[in-house]
Amino acid sequence: MEGNEHYRIEITSKRITISGATVRAVYYGVMTMDQLLLGDVCATTQKKISPVYVDDAPRFSHRALMLDPARHFLPVNDVKFFIDKMAHYKYNILQLHLTDDQGWRVEIKKHPKLVGKDYYTQEQLAEIIQYAAQRNIEVIPELDIPGHTVAILAAYPELGCTHTDTLPKIVGKTTDLMLCANNQKVYSVYQDIIKSNAFTNDSTHCISSLAYMKLNYYCNVKRNQQLVLLFSTSVTKIRFYVNPKKLCSVLNFS
């Protein structure tokens, strides 16, 4: 068989055989078998499955969905339900959007002011990651910087740009504020965040252990040159703080 996700299903009148290149491949074969059972057995009066031969492998190795508990918080069991559905349809990447203007949803013990009423403890995040890994899904936690950061600015307003000092920073209401790319405190705080147990505890199966850094930035044309220079500096610094072996994805500008 070619590829580590290639599997085959052979159904005859006497037996069902599922074979695969890896344990993961066999798991996907079981998921397809489940779909066949739902389609044939449950939908026919005879409650029988027809003989069939399936030879299947994914066209794309990266099959991802994004879940956004930052804007609309989801309890752990709801996230697990979503993961179960992903596994059923053979998705293998869950991008978990944990921070935005509407909330900071992951516990950082060194900076407890970041979280509000609804958030995942480090243990709960580890539980989600492990639950997904058992279903062959990699969880990529996502932290928005330097934009979409009202939640962190409400907790630590000194991380913002000086010209926004007098603006209200209300979680869920204020928008279009960003961290100051020229403020060294920003990098110190994010170094604490990246190195916290929420993202670096290998025992939790935090696959690649972290840190997809989605760098959102809004370049106003009138101040473009200076801000792009500052932003490029921030990208360089953030990359320095993240272990390249643990950087799950490329930096994404949007």
Image (spheres, helix red, strand yellow):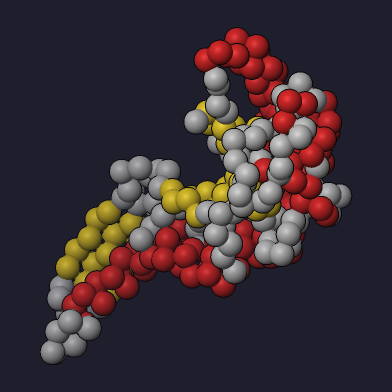
Residue 182, horizontal then vertical, whole percent: 76, 21
Farthest front residue?
166
Q: Is residue 212 above or below residue 241?
A: below
- Horizontal relation, residue 55 to residue 106: left or right: left
Q: Identify the residue at horizontal 50%, vertical 55% (top origin).
A: 67
Whether residue 131 can be seen here: no
Residue at the top extreme, as displayed: 225
Vertical placement of residue 124 versus 157, above or below: below
Residue at 79% across, 47% down:
155
- Residue 109 visible: yes
- Foreground residue, 173 or 210? 173
- Front position in the image: 248 or 100: 100
How far across and down, in percent of the image, does residue 74 sit?
56, 65
- In the rendered image, which quarter is residue 24 located in? bottom left
Q: Position of residue 144 (x, y in %)?
A: 62, 40
Q: How many marks?
A: 0
Q: Percent position (x, y) of residue 136?
A: 50, 58
From the viewer's side, name the closer residue of 25 and 229.
Answer: 229
- Which quarter of the picture shows residue 166? top right
In the figure, 122 relative to 63: above or below? below
Query: Considering only vertical position in the picture, is 179 above or below 86?
Result: above
- Of residues 2 and 104, which is closer to you in this image? 104
- Residue at image coords 55%, 21%: 219
Give the residue drawn at x 67%, y 56%.
105
